[in-house]
Image (cartoon, rainbow, N blue to C red):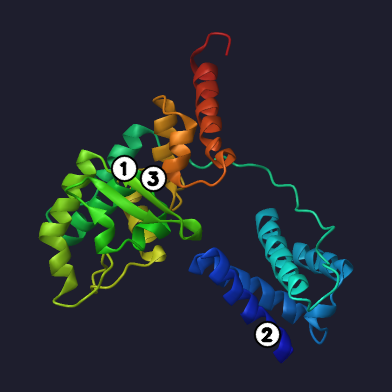
Amino acid sequence: MMLMDTELINRFIDYYWLTTGASKNTLSAYRSDLNIFNEWLQDKDITLVNSKHIQNYFEARQKNGIGASTQARILTCLRLFYHYLLVNKVINIDPTSKLHHPKQEKKLPVFLNIEEVEKLLEAPALNSILGQRDRAMLELLYSCGLRVSELINLSYHNINLKEEYIRIHGKGNKERVLPMGELAIDYLSTYENNARELLLKNGQCDSYFLSNRGQAMSRQNFFYIVKSYANLAGIEKPLSPHSLRHAFATHLVQKGADLRSVQLMLGHSDISSTQLYTHIQNAQLKAQHEKHHPRG
């Protein structure tokens, strides 16, 4: 890996963060994608790459079992990187301009019905400090449809229990203000009044939800918590960190909420992302028809 290439990658990552406010996870993935690509090039200058080199790279990665979604992310990363080099006159031709994303089969997210959500929310033991924290997190996630990154990055001043709203800084640092349900507010109040101060352990931390060490919680830690409670609740479906977010949106659509409102609450920049939840509802209706109709 050439030193100059490493410097270009670092400059691009800094530029991308400054111009988009991308999350740490996205920046880390893009940095890793570019470094792996650069290592594959060996002694070849990353600025002298053409489309054939990139095609050969993807063919090599495919032999190692890389999936279509990962290919799509890497190509997006390479496009952004080489566009940055083109704009800054480091290169004259963008080698990614005629490359296409691999076709991906759209998979519907795992859907939790209302009964399963209730079981998951009720799994934490409220007679413990961590149980009070976990119940508050799960209730807030389902009440507002937050991304996990938004949940764990919440600051203490982002939540106003008296006014019953929460202020979120989502993707691209875009702000949205969301209403909270009464149950979520009740459990958040219990957490604030009983558990948070004890978790803080006389220290200082602006993060709203704290680990047992009195620090900000990690995404991995939260997902471990969700999986533990899913097992405790007897939920056998394969959950993701966003399962409650998907449930929030799907249940709203099922109850007749308009897509535009759901889009705003989820923080989707494009309504086509929100339309996914109408597909979940349609898939459910089809399954019910096949199960119960005499000619299904």
| Residue 237 position within the rendered picture, expressed as x and y whole percent measured from the top left | 44, 43
To which quarter of the image does residue 43 belong? bottom right
Q: Residue at x 49, y 41 (%)?
A: 110
Q: CA distance from mark 1 to mark 3?
A: 6 Å
Q: Are marks 1 and 3 in contact (CB under 8 Å)?
A: yes
Quarter placement of the N terminus: bottom right
Residue 100 in the image, given as x and y percentages of width and height: 79, 54
Badge 2 is on which residue? 6
> Which residue is nearer to you in this view: 174 or 214?
174
Amino acid under label 3? Answer: Gly
**Residue located beneath label 3 in the image:** 145
Separation (CA) of disc 3 from disc 2: 38 Å
In the image, residue 68 above or below residue 180: below
Q: Residue 143, labelled with which disc? A: 1
Of the residues shown, which amino acid type is indicated by label 1?
Answer: Ser
The spot of residue 57 in percent (x, y) is 80, 69
**Which residue appears at 81% of the width and 83% of the height?**
45
Specify which label sits upstream in the sequence, 1 or 2.
Answer: 2
Q: Nearer the viewer, residue 152 or 125?
A: 152
Lateral position of residue 203 relative to residue 173, left or right: left
